[in-house]
Image (spheres, coloured by chain):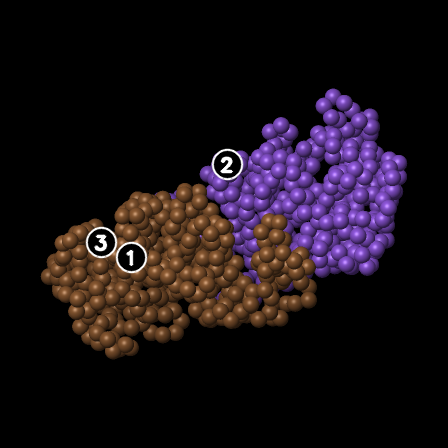
Chain colours: A purple, B brown
Amino acid sequence: MDLGVGELGTPGNSKPHQPSGQISHLALDIGGSLIKLVYFSTSDDVDDETGRSATESLSVYNGNKKYPVLKGRLHFAKFETTKIYDCLEFIQKNQLHLGGCQHLEASPIDKAVIKATGGGAYKYADLFQEKLGICLDKEDEMDCLVAGANFLLKGIHQEAFTYMDGQKEFVQIDHNDLYPYLLVNIGSGVSMLKVDGDGKFERVSGTNVGGGTFWGLGRLLTNCKSFDELLELSHKGNNRVIDMLVGDIYGGMDYSKIGLSSTTIASSFGKAISDSKELADYRPEDIARSLLRMISNNIGQISYLNALRFGLKRIFFGGFFIRGHAYTMDTIAVAVHFWSKGEAKAMFLRHEGFLGASGAFMSYGKCGLDDLMVQLIQQFPFTASPAGDT
Amino acid sequence: MDLGVGELGTPGNSKPHQPSGQISHLALDIGGSLIKLVYFSTSDDVDDETGRSATESLSVYNGNKKYPVLKGRLHFAKFETTKIYDCLEFIQKNQLHLGGCQHLEASPIDKAVIKATGGGAYKYADLFQEKLGICLDKEDEMDCLVAGANFLLKGIHQEAFTYMDGQKEFVQIDHNDLYPYLLVNIGSGVSMLKVDGDGKFERVSGTNVGGGTFWGLGRLLTNCKSFDELLELSHKGNNRVIDMLVGDIYGGMDYSKIGLSSTTIASSFGKAISDSKELADYRPEDIARSLLRMISNNIGQISYLNALRFGLKRIFFGGFFIRGHAYTMDTIAVAVHFWSKGEAKAMFLRHEGFLGASGAFMSYGKCGLDDLMVQLIQQFPFTASPAGDT
C-alpha cells in the first residue's frame, strides 16, 4: 500500500486525479482554509503519470503474527474550503461516498455515513446532506489530529524527518519510545498538543498567527492568487529589505552581549516604518519572505516554549501550512534550534497536511465496520511493504 | 518633582515643549523607531498649558532619614529616529547637552559627554560628535532598561497599574517584594528580561513581532501617516471582519471541548484569504484593529510562557508600543489572563516608553558626578511629593 501524498485537487489550478477501482472509507477534514480527503481504493490499474502499478500490498504484523495482505491504496486530496462545491462534485463524480468494502466482503454500510472532522463538519453538515445525501459523522478535531499523527508515526516507514541547512534526514521512530511528544498542527490557526499515548493528549497551547495569517496578509500585501504562489514567491525574496535587523539599529554591529548577531531580525517589517516607501515600492517576493519568516519563527518559538514547559524533547510539526516547503521548515527548525540553544529539534511529517483526515479515516475502526479498518487500527504496529513482498 | 510624561516631541506633528531654567543630565535612548530623551531642569516658570507651577520639589527618604529637597523637574521627550535631525536641533536649541549641575553646586562636566543607550548610541555616535560636539557615553541597552524599570517601580508612587475591562487599578509595589519579575519591553522588537535585583537580570526571551511590526505592516496596509494615527484608527475598528473566528470555522458554534468560544480568533487575518475581496475592500480601521490584536495577543502569550518558565508572578510591560492605549493594554492583559487561566496578571507602567532613557539617566550616578544623581540613586527608596510638602 502506497501512502504517498497524491497531488490531487491542488487548490486553484489542477483538477484532482480520478481514482478507479472500488473505493471505500472516505474521510474528511474540513478546516477554515482547506478540505482534506482521505479514502481507500482497491484499484488494479496503472498510474497515469508514473506508469507504475498503483496496486500495492500491505503485510500486517502484530508481534510475530502476520495478517492477510491488503491490496490497495490510500488516496489524499485537498480543496480550498471556499471551493466546497468543487469538492462536492469530485465526491459525487467519483462516487467516493457510496463505496462499501466489497473487496473484503464486509457488510455494506446501510446509509451514506461519512466520517468528518474539523469545524466544517458542523458548518457544512446540512450542505452535504442536501447535495449528496451524506450524513457527516462528526469526529472531534483534536482526537483526529492525534490519532492521525500516531497512525502515521507508528505505521509509516520514513514518515518523520528533520530539516536543517537544506538537508532532510529521516528519523527512525522507536514505537516504544514515541511518547510523550508535542504535536504542532499548523492550519489556518495553530494547535499545540501534548501527546502521551493513543487517545491520551491535552491541547496545551496554540496561536492565532498561522497559515491563514500568512495567506490572508500575503493576499492583502501582494497580488498572489494562491497560497502556493505566495510560498513560491517567498523562495525568491530577501527579507532584509523590509525587516529591521539588529545591525540596522546598531549601525551594522552585533549586540553580542546578549547573543544577537547583526543579522538577527529585531523587528519583522520594521523597515517599512520609513516614510519614503509605500507598499508598491517593495517587491512582493521580499514581503512574502518576511511574512513567512515572521510566522514560521513565531510558531517555532511558541512551540519550543511549550515543549520546554512539559519537558518534551520531540516536536512534530504538521498541517498544510508547511507544504514540504524548504524555507518554511528551515525557519521553524532554526527557531527551535535558536530558542532551545540547540537542545530541541523540530521534526516534520511527510503526510503533514492529512493528520486530521487520517485520524477521521482511522475512526471507522471504532465502529467495527469491516476488516480493513480492524486490521489497520487494531493490529498496530504494521509495516508497509512494497508490491511483491507477500 | 513631577515625573509625568511631558508630551514633548510627539512624532509627526507637534513641536516639543521648550524647557526653561538650568538643564542637566540629558540622557538618550536611541532605538530603531524612536529616540527618547530624559533630562532634569531647575525651572521656576509656570507651565504653558496647565498654568500650574512647573517647579516642584522632592523629599528624599532613606528609611526614616529625610534628605535635602531637590527642586526641579524631570522632562521626557521623544522623536522618530528617522527624524534625528529634528532631535539634534531640539538639543542644540535648548542647549540640553551643555547643562551642568549649577543648582546643586556640583563640579561642571569637563566636556559634553552624554549618556546614551540603544543601538543608535553606536549608529549615530559620529553624527552627534560632528553636529553637536557631543561624545555619546554608551550604556548597555538591557542594563538601562532594568535600571530604569527598577527606578520607576521603586521610586514613583502609582507607577504600576493593572488594566482590565477598561479599569485601571494602581498597584502598590512593596519594595521588599519586587523581585523577581519579568520585564517585557515592547519597542520596535520585544525584549523579555527576568529581573532579580538591581543590576541582576537575564534576557530570557524576546520576539521580533513588536511595535515596528505593527507600525511597518500598518503603514503598508493602511494610509496612516503616523503610529498614533494607526492606534487611533484601531480604536474604531472591528477585527471580526478580517479575522477568522472559531465560529467562522464551526458554523457559529463554540469548540467548547477545548475551551474555545465561537468568538475566539482562530486565525488572525484568516478571512482575508477570500478571493472576493482585495485590500481596498477592507476598512483601514478593521485592519488596524486586527493587527493590533494579533501583535498584542502574541506578545502577551510569549510573555506568559516565559513567566511560567521561571515561576514569575509579575509581568511588567513597558516600551513605547503601548502608549497608554486602552485597547493595547486590554488585549495584552486578556492574553495573559487567557493563557494563564487567570493565574498571572499583566501590569503596566506610567512611564512605559522611557525605561531605557531613565536607566541611562540614572547611570550618571555611577560616575559620582554630582549630588543630584547620588541622591536619586543611592538613597532609594524615595517618595515624590507635591509642591509645598517641605
Q: Residue at x 17, y 53 (%)?
A: B62
Marks 3 & 2 on one chain:
no
From the viewer's side, name the closer residue of A348 and B256: B256
Q: Is residue A269 left or right of residue A252?
A: right
Q: Chain of mark 1?
A: B
Q: Quadrant of residue A155?
A: top right
Q: Answer few, some or many: residues within 10 Å of disc 2's Cα (few below 14, many 20 plus, some between 14 and 19).
A: few
From the viewer's side, name the closer residue of A65 and B219: A65
Q: Residue at x 34, y 50 (%)?
A: B142
Residue for badge 2:
A311
Q: Position of residue B371 (x, y in %)?
A: 14, 57
- Are circles 1 and 3 on residues that touch, CB within 8 Å? no
Q: Is residue A382 left or right of residue A214?
A: right
* Above or below: residue B273 compared with residue B367: below
From the viewer's side, name the closer residue of A84 and B128: A84
Residue for badge 3:
B381
- The quadrant of the picture occupied by the N terminus of chain A is top right
From the viewer's side, name the closer residue of B69 and B251: B251
Q: Answer few, some or many: residues within 10 Å of disc 1's Cα (few below 14, many 20 plus, some between 14 and 19).
A: many
Measured in 3D between alpha carbons, the distance from the residue under mark 3 to the one under mark 2, in whole angstroms, is 41 Å
Q: Residue at x 80, y 56 (%)?
A: A129
Residue for badge 1:
B152
Q: Is residue A230 left or right of residue A376?
A: left
Q: Amino acid at mark 3?
A: Pro
- Of helix, strand and loop, which one carries label 2? loop
Q: Residue at x 75, y 56 (%)?
A: A125
Q: Quadrant of residue B168?
A: bottom left
